Image (cartoon, helix red, strand yellow):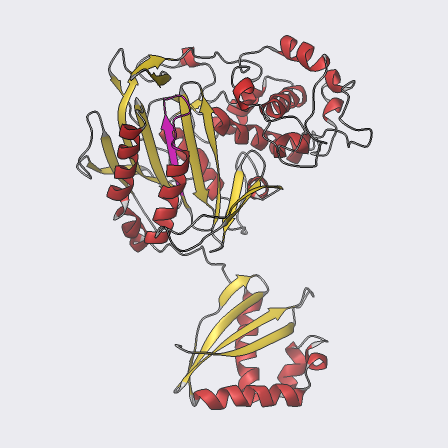
Amino acid sequence: MPSQISKTWLMLAPLVLIFSGGLVPLPAHAQAQVYAPAEFKDADRLQKVMALIPEVDKLYADLAKTEHLPGLSYGIVMDGKLIHTYSQGMANLERRTPVTTKTQFRIASMTKSFATMATLRLRDQGLLKLDDPVSQYLPELRNIRLPTIDSPALTIRHLMTMTTGLPEDNPWGDRQMALNNRSLEQFVGGGLSFSNVPGGTFEYSNLGYVLLGKVISKVSKMRFQDYITKNILLPLGMKDTIWEYTKAPVDQFALGYQWRNNQWEAEPILHDGDAAAMGGLITTIEDFALYTAFHLSAWPARNELDNAPVKRASLREMQQAQIFAGMQTKSTLLDGVTANPRFISYAYGLRTTRDSQNVIVVGHGGGLPGYGSQFYFAPDHGIAVIAFSNLRYGPVYGLTGKALNLLIEKAKLPARSVQAPGILLQRQQQVAELIQHWDLALGNAIAADNFFLDYSPEDRIAESKKHFDSIGKVLSVSAIRAENQLRGNFEIKGENGGLLIAFTLTPEPDPKVQFISISKISNP
């Protein structure tokens, strides 16, 4: 059962175990747990997601069987709470140690967002700037020859966004994690080969994150591992998240394996090293749920005390698209037919996708010899799925995205609504009054300079009369749907139909109405 987490920065409620096992026919050594948070604000929302859990459990169980995963653990986080976990298989085949939510997996490149989070924390403290040249902190880079004479300086931002111009290096980079600083300095100081100009295009570079770790160490005056542990992991309550595998209890650490010649073979395990910012963290589903909930807690922006390890604004910045990374033009909805293409970007140690339904999903995968992991979260929907495995590049990547899409689509989870500020509520009432009666004194009081210049009062009155005549007697005015702090829409229901009213306010200190549209809706 997960540990009590109510005292973390996230102020999460304790998790209460209410069910164990029996959700689906479970394989040997499988554990399914559903958690009921003590005070879940939206019980209906929770119930809709819980109804889909047997289907998601089966997806992961089938994957484990098909792909020969020695061990697997996944979890669902919603509205700041770990609401479900499923674990199966073995963490250690020789010792027959079963996987649980406390099993420690190496999460490989999912480590990268911790490095960028640490960098933003240092930036927020005024200790560095994202557009500083990396050579300002790492002297070994000062004599690096860039690919062209007009190349921009290599910056910290380039490291964070995979726009260093260094070549894609997954196979090579995965074996470099245990290098020490002296070896790294000699390697980098001997010169680097670039595939692109810095800042020009996305190309996945583990070496870039090795350099970012060194920058964190230089600026913080401590090993980046210690900085991240002290300032991020421990404040979030991630007490079982470590860097060196030999510090994990033997019965808690997931050994890595590969499937070869119809059998599992143990993989060599890399020790912690000075290159570990690219992929060295070791954690549990319970701990990583806290980290994922922390990311989700940044939304929406709000007027609340902000004393977490990293500012909410910086968390949101981490998740924002920074550089185009690709398109998934053939993606579909769950029916496999309806087109749903996705636009992919790289953010700061995270990938961000936006699909044709305007669903935003953020996350990152991780793969090393012996391990495969993935997490995805939907900031606007407040839900996430995390999965770890101890197979070489264990393919939980696509399925974890599918699981999140399934929960959002089948549970019909709406995007988190924007809370309308007082001025938007006030202007809604005034707009509803104005378009029905056209009191010009009211119009002059709330209208922006352009409003009656764009269309004369006579034209606006004539258009409104046409629309209101078509719906007959007005029966009700709906609550506003805020699109943001200065834009919203609402419906007016009449005896013979309804109207959709949309309006936008100006950026003035006392925001005025700059735009109103009125359109007929078929089913008010």
Q: Is residue 255 magenta?
A: no
Residue 506's quadrant in the figure? Answer: bottom right
**Image coords of residue 268 (percent x, y):** 42, 10
Residue 185's quadrant in the figure? Answer: top right
Q: Is residue 391 magenta?
A: yes
**Image coords of residue 356 (percent x, y):** 49, 55
Residue occupying image coordinates x 62% and y 85%: 460
Task: Say if 254 sits above or below 314 in the image.
Answer: above
> Which image quarter holds the C terminus?
bottom left
Residue occupying image coordinates x 51% and y 23%: 279
Residue 78 visible? The answer is no
**Image coords of residue 398 (percent x, y):** 41, 37
**Image coords of residue 197 (percent x, y):** 72, 31
The one nearer the camera, 384 or 205, is 205
Number of numbered discs on residues: 0
Residue 2's quadrant in the figure? Answer: top left
Residue at the right extreme of this rendering: 149
Residue 431 visible? The answer is yes
Residue occupying image coordinates x 29% and y 41%: 56
> Which image quarter holds the N terminus?
top left
Residue occupying image coordinates x 63% and y 73%: 513
Quick check: 306 left or right of 397?
A: right
In the image, the segment drawn in magenta is 384-396
Task: Say if 484 sits above or below 188 in the image.
Answer: below
